Image (cartoon, rainbow, N blue to C red):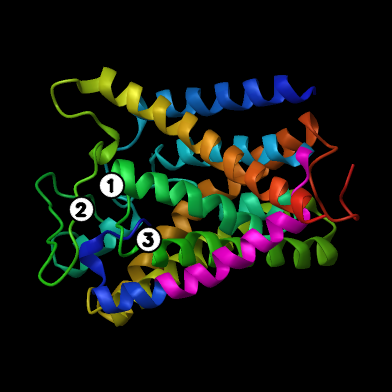
Amino acid sequence: MHIPDAFIPLSQGAVYWIVALIFIALSLRWAKKEMSEEKIPLVAVLAAGIFAIQAFNLPVAMGTSGHLVGGALAAIILGSPFAAVFILTLVLVIQGILFGDGGITTMGANIVNMGVIGGFVGYYTFHGLTIATKNQNASLFIAAWLACVVSALACAIEMYLAGTFPLVPGLVAMGLYHAAIGVIEGGITVFAVNLIATARPDIIVLPRAVSA
Amino acid sequence: MERNTFILLGIAIAICIGVLAVFLASGDPDGLESTALVVQGDKTLTGATPENAEIKEDLTGKFSYEAPFPDYTMGDALGKPGELIVMVIGVILAFVAVFGASKLVTQARKKEA
């Protein structure tokens, strides 16, 4: 879902950068207020894991592959959608500048899609579903799946506004492929949250109804 | 689990995932690339991706940038060993960047207090 430079005109890329910068500023305010010394290793290890797993494309049929995005995972584990913005921004900067994975002028759009939309949709869906169903793993899976799909649909709309994709075929293809890729997102999110909750239950932030 | 053990184990797992990615990652296009191929008529929605399918990128009036390690490689000459080195660098860099940024933020808070 990393948008390359060629897919969005400079003027539109600038608009997404402005939106991204607003959320980056808010994420820094969150980090300044909420980040404890104990949480720093978890945040950094999460970033390293998200970087590695984003490079691991798994086949999802239909001649397509996909990988974990990680916005929902970061937001749920750290208890704030701004945590996803904080982590994904730094990961996307490294990927874009060093590895050409995602563009420079489109980095704002990538931060908005994967960090902001992924983080907010994942976090609030998880909390809403947890309250409604009291089922942690099902809530995690659905929240991460939905975060992946909604981010992809937002990306399809951005591609339409950029004149890169027609609207309906873009929405259909992005929605279909990421509905399949979202299964990977959901599965890895369930596994990772349970793994970290077992290893460091003291630093993970989960709703009270499902905390161990 | 103790803090240092957690960090070392976390980085080790991330490096293992990165190493596996070098050898096992799918060569099929991702969701965005597949969609681009579909809308330009080089792929059907649910069919396999043709081997020679290529995304047409129009860079007219757009920014162009050549990354030092494009597509997580060090060029064709270094092959898989180069990809492994790049992946390890990336994992460690992601850890250091986020650890450093987090430290800076918490230190700024302490100074203000």
Q: How crowded is mark 1: few (under 14 residues within 10 Å), some or many (20 or more)?
A: many
Q: Is residue A146 above or below residue A99?
A: below
* Magenta-tinted stretch: A17-37
In the image, what residue type sits under mark 3?
A: Met
Q: Mark 3 lies on which chain?
A: A
The residue identified by callout 3 is A107
Residue closer to the observer: A199 or A8: A8
The residue identified by callout 1 is A100
Q: Mark 1 lies on which chain?
A: A
Q: Which chain carries label 2?
A: B
- Tell me, for residue B91, which label it has, or none: none
Task: Tell me, yes or no, whether the two marked residues, 1 and 2, touch with CB atoms within 8 Å.
Answer: yes
In the image, what residue type sits under mark 1?
A: Gly
- Looking at the image, which residue is at 12% across and 61% down? B56
> Could you tell me what secondary structure mostly forms the magenta stretch?
helix
Q: Farthest residue toward the front?
A: B111
Q: Earlier in the sequence, mark 3 or mark 1?
A: 1
Image x and y of residue A175, in percent? 42, 67
Image x and y of residue B106, in percent? 72, 47
- Tell me, for residue B65, which label it has, or none: 2
